[in-house]
Amino acid sequence: MSNRICQHMLATLFVSIALFPNAAAKTKIVPLQTSVSLSTRVPKNRRTAAIKTTDGSVAYVLSLEPDFDVGHHVVTLELVLRRAADKSDAPNLLDPTGSRHGLQAYDFAASDLAQEAQKSVFGKKRTVRLQELQLVLLITVSNAVVSPVSNGGYQIDALDLRIKVDNSES
């Protein structure tokens, strides 16, 4: 009889664990304060930053990825978040829908920064909340230098971002 009780208790335990996978599966990260930058005049830029879990493994990688116009001018820089194991062409986790339209808080367009970061659409300080990953990113544009190009547009000459990444409350 006691064997049946043990089996029942184990079955109940396994069912309970199966019903609450999100509680144990959420990745907790070590809060991070970092910077990423790109400069067309400096050959070595710090364009990536690793986000580690509480056990010390790398969970995510943040990177600045340029978008060029036909004249090979950097016209936009996109802040990209990927899982550490993802390939470089994996979707940006900062865009959880995968169907973004228009400028986003993680986009840094030369034309938007031409009047200075404070006057840009999202301002100098930007917040990106990722409910699914339970992360929040606080992004500050610490330096943005743009210059006009011959087609009437602008190119990014330098962009420095200070970024804080933490687990969200929800």
Image (cartoon, rainbow, N blue to C red):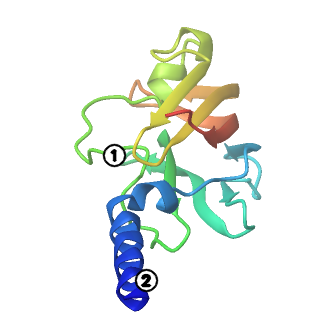
* Residue 150 percent coordinates (x, y): 45, 31
Total numbered badges shown on the rendered structure: 2
Quarter of the figure with the N terminus: bottom left
Residue at the extreme top of the image, as rendered: 119
Q: Is residue 84 visible?
A: yes
Query: What's under tag 1, amino acid-wise?
Result: Pro
- Which quadrant of the structure image shows residue 102? top left
Q: CA distance from mark 2 to mark 1?
A: 43 Å
Marks 2 and 1 close (CB-CB < 8 Å):
no
- At horizontal 33% and vertical 46% (from top left) the residue drawn is 96
* Residue 23 percent coordinates (x, y): 47, 54
Q: Earlier in the sequence, mark 2 or mark 1?
A: 2
Query: What's under tag 2, amino acid-wise?
Result: Cys
- The one of 51 and 110 positioned closer to us in this rendering: 51
Q: Mark 2, residues whose alpha carbon is within 10 Å: few (<14), some, or many (≥20)?
A: few
Tell me the element at label 1: loop
Q: Mark 1, residues whose alpha carbon is within 10 Å: few (<14), some, or many (≥20)?
A: few
- At horizontal 54% and vertical 21% (from top left) the residue drawn is 113
Tell me the element at label 2: helix
Work out whether 126 lies above or below 108. above
Q: Which residue is mark 1?
A: 96
* Residue 42 percent coordinates (x, y): 77, 50
Work out whether 13 lies above or below 145. below
Q: Which residue is mark 2?
A: 6
- The one of 28 and 15 positioned closer to us in this rendering: 15
Image-based side of 160 in relation to 130, left or right: right
Work out whether 134 lies above or below 139. below
- Which quadrant of the structure image shows residue 143? top right
- At horizontal 45% and vertical 15% (from top left) the residue drawn is 121
Image-based side of 99 in relation to 38, left or right: left
- The one of 98 and 150 positioned closer to us in this rendering: 98
